[in-house]
Image (cartoon, helix red, strand yellow):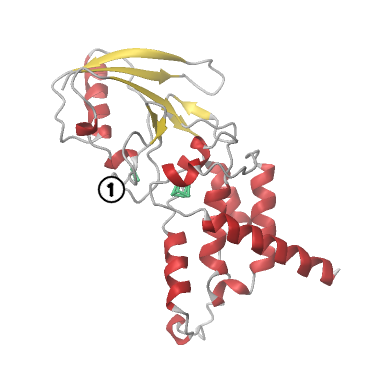
Amino acid sequence: MNLTLKIWRQKNKNDKGRLETYQVSNISPDSSFLEMLDVLNEQLINEGKEPVAFDHDCREGICGMCSLYINGEAHGPDRGVTTCQLHMRKFKDGDTIYIEPWRSAAFPVIKDLVVDRSAFDRIMAAGGFVSVNTSGNTQDANNIPIPKDDADKAFDAATCIGCGACVATCKNGSAMLFVSAKVSQFALLPQGKVEATRRVHNMVKQMDEEGFGNCSNTGACEVECPKGISLENIARMNREYLKASIISEDEE
Ligand code: SF4
Ligand code: FES
């Protein structure tokens, strides 16, 4: 396949940035999108030019690092896949492909296609954990019976890989799908109930402080999420938040 690539180049967060045009040829339709970018970068290095910076790690859909806006869609035209799982057979020979970084004020561009997603880390640090006493007397988790439906829903929520496609896709730059998945994976299990009030309050507070927008139920996040995280989680987080607010008021 021969392709024209229009790629966002930006030296650093203060640079204005611009789209630059590149040509790549003899790309196998069976190669992944990131492999196609590797070919481009090899070409640029051989020409003595600066390669395109882009995020990646596992290249098998589990780490959440790859994060490209391709032809106006987070993770490109395929559904239920990350950029590293996207194959060039989804494009046609002779295509022009636009490649941009995630779009969100809360994810500032570091360089080219790499954005700073540390806002997600700070939200997790605010409450995305379960405190466990590891004194040696820790109870075996399997001793606590959990209804199958709850276990399945918690597992589904836990499959969120923190890629940020939901934020990049949302016209409000909302992080509600991500945060609600992280709240839900604990809210559904007995182990998560102990810190539930504090968790949802602190995570939502941090989310707001990071500058993410509000959810207006467009549902775009669910469509573009590579892990199929359901909007049901947002409804659950809103219920958890309301419950936590009532409990906090009672305690005051
Ligand atoms: S909810 Fe989906 S799109 Fe958002 S961070 Fe998690 S896996 Fe990525
Ligand atoms: S590189 Fe890990 S999910 Fe794409």
Task: Report the residue marked by disc 1.
Answer: 60
Residue 120 as seen in the image, left or right of residue 49: right
As shown in the figure, which amino acid type bears the numbered disc 1?
Glu
Q: Position of residue 78 (x, y in %)?
A: 31, 39
Residue 184 in percent (x, y) is at: 54, 63
Residue shown at the point (57%, 68%) measured from the top left: 187
Residue at left offset 41%, top offset 58% = 159
Q: Is residue 127 visible?
A: no
- Placement of 100 over or under 82, stated as above or below: above
Q: Is residue 141 visible?
A: yes
Quadrant in which the N terminus is drawn:
top left
Q: Is residue 226 left or right of residue 209?
A: left
Q: Helix, strand, or loop for circle 1? A: loop
Residue 27 shown left or right of residue 105 in the figure: left
Q: Is residue 27 above or below residue 132?
A: above
Q: Quadrant of the C terminus?
A: bottom right
Percent x, y for residue 192?
57, 71
Residue drawn where x is 69% and y is 58% of the image: 201
Residue at image location 37% in from the left, 13% down from the top: 20
Binning the other alpha carbons within 10 Å of mark 1 as few (below 14), some (14 to 19) or many (20 upward) gives some
Q: Is mark 1 within 8 Å of ligand 2?
A: yes
Q: Position of residue 218 (x, y in %)?
A: 55, 41
Above or below — where is 129 with respect to 165?
below
